[in-house]
Image (tube, rainbow, N blue to C red):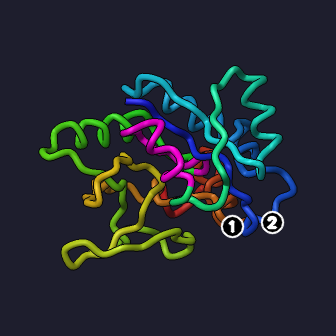
C-alpha cells in the first residue's frame, strides 16, 4: 500500500512565514520527520501531495528526491477525493504530526488488511487522554466515546469507516497553532521537562 503525505495546506492558523512542512523541530523539518517514519514502515512507496499553496515545499521535495503529486488544494476532503481515482486505497498521512512512528503506520495498514470487508480506517486518540492545552483538529464520536482524529488514515472509496485507536497522547498533536508548535518542540527535546512525557 502506498502512503501519501499531505503537505499542501495553507497553514494560515500557524502564523509562520514559512510553509508548515518546512518548519524545523529539533533540527528536522516536519516533512522529513514524517518521511522518515513512512520510509521505515511497511508502506510500499510514498508521494508528497503538494498544492499551489506550497511552492517551497514542492521545491524542497524535488531537491530531496521525494516523489510529489499536485492536488487542487481546496481542502483536506477535496484533495482526498482527487487522489482516490488515482490510488484506490492508500495511507494518508498529514505532514504536521511529528510524533508519528513507523509502527503507527504499520498498525493501521495491518488493521485495514485484517478487516473484512475492507473499509476506510481513521487513526484516532481518545479525547480523554489528550492534554487540555493541545488544539484538537477534529473530534468525533464512536460508540458513545469521543476521539481525536490524529492525521493518519487508510483512505478508500468505501462510505464506511472505523476508528483505529492509538492510546498515545502525543500522536494527537497536529501542528496547527503556535502553541502546538511549542508543545511539539518541548516534547521532542529531551532536555525540556514537560508533564506529557
Vertical placement of 115 versus 12: above or below? Answer: above
Mark carried by residue 177: 1
Mark carried by residue 58: none
Vertical placement of 192 versus 90: above or below? Answer: below
Residue at 78% across, 32% down: 60
Residue 57 as seen in the image, left or right of residue 190: right
Residue at 60% across, 51% down: 96
Q: Which residue reaches farthest bottom?
A: 144
Contact between labelled residues 1 and 2, with CB atoms less than 8 Å apart? yes
Residue located beneath label 2 in the image: 15
**Any magenta on residue 90?**
yes
**Any magenta on residue 3?**
no
Looking at the rendered structure, the secondary structure element under dot 1 is loop
**Residue 143: x and y, percent?**
19, 74
Precedes in sequence: disc 2 or disc 1: 2
- Residue 102's image quarter? top left
Q: How many residues crowd around disc 2 within 10 Å: few (fewer than 14), some, or many (20 or more)?
A: few
What residue span does the magenta drawing correspond to?
79-96
Looking at the rendered structure, the secondary structure element under dot 2 is loop
**Residue 44: x and y, percent?**
41, 23
Amino acid at each position: 500500500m502506498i502512503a501519501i503525505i499531505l503537505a499542501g495546506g495553507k497553514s494560515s492558523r500557524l502564523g509562520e512565514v514559512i510553509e508548515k512542512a518546512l518548519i524545523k523541530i529539533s533540527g528536522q523539518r516536519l516533512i522529513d520527520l514524517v518521511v522518515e517514519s513512512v520510509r521505515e514502515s511497511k508502506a510500499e512507496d510514498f508521494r508528497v501531495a503538494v498544492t499551489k499553496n506550497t511552492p517551497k515545499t514542492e521545491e524542497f521535495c524535488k531537491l530531496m528526491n521525494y516523489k510529489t503529486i499536485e492536488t487542487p488544494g481546496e481542502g483536506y476532503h477535496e484533495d482526498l477525493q482527487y487522489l482516490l481515482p488515482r490510488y484506490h486505497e492508500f495511507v494518508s498521512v498529514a505532514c504536521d504530526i511529528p510524533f508519528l512512528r513507523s509502527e503507527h503506520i504499520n498498525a493501521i495498514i495491518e488493521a485495514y488488511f485484517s478487516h473484512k470487508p475492507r473499509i476506510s480506517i481513521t487513526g484516532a486518540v481518545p479525547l480523554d487522554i489528550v492534554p487540555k492545552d493541545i488544539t484538537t483538529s477534529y473530534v468525533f464520536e464512536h460508540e458513545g466515546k469521543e476521539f481525536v482524529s490524529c492525521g493518519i488514515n487508510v483512505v478508500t472509496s468505501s462510505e464506511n469507516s472505523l476508528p483505529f485507536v492509538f492510546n498515545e497522547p502525543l500522536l494527537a498533536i497536529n501542528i496547527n497553532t503556535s502553541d502546538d508548535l511549542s508543545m511539539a518542540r518541548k516534547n521532542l527535546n529531551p532536555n525540556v521537562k514537560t508533564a506529557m512525557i
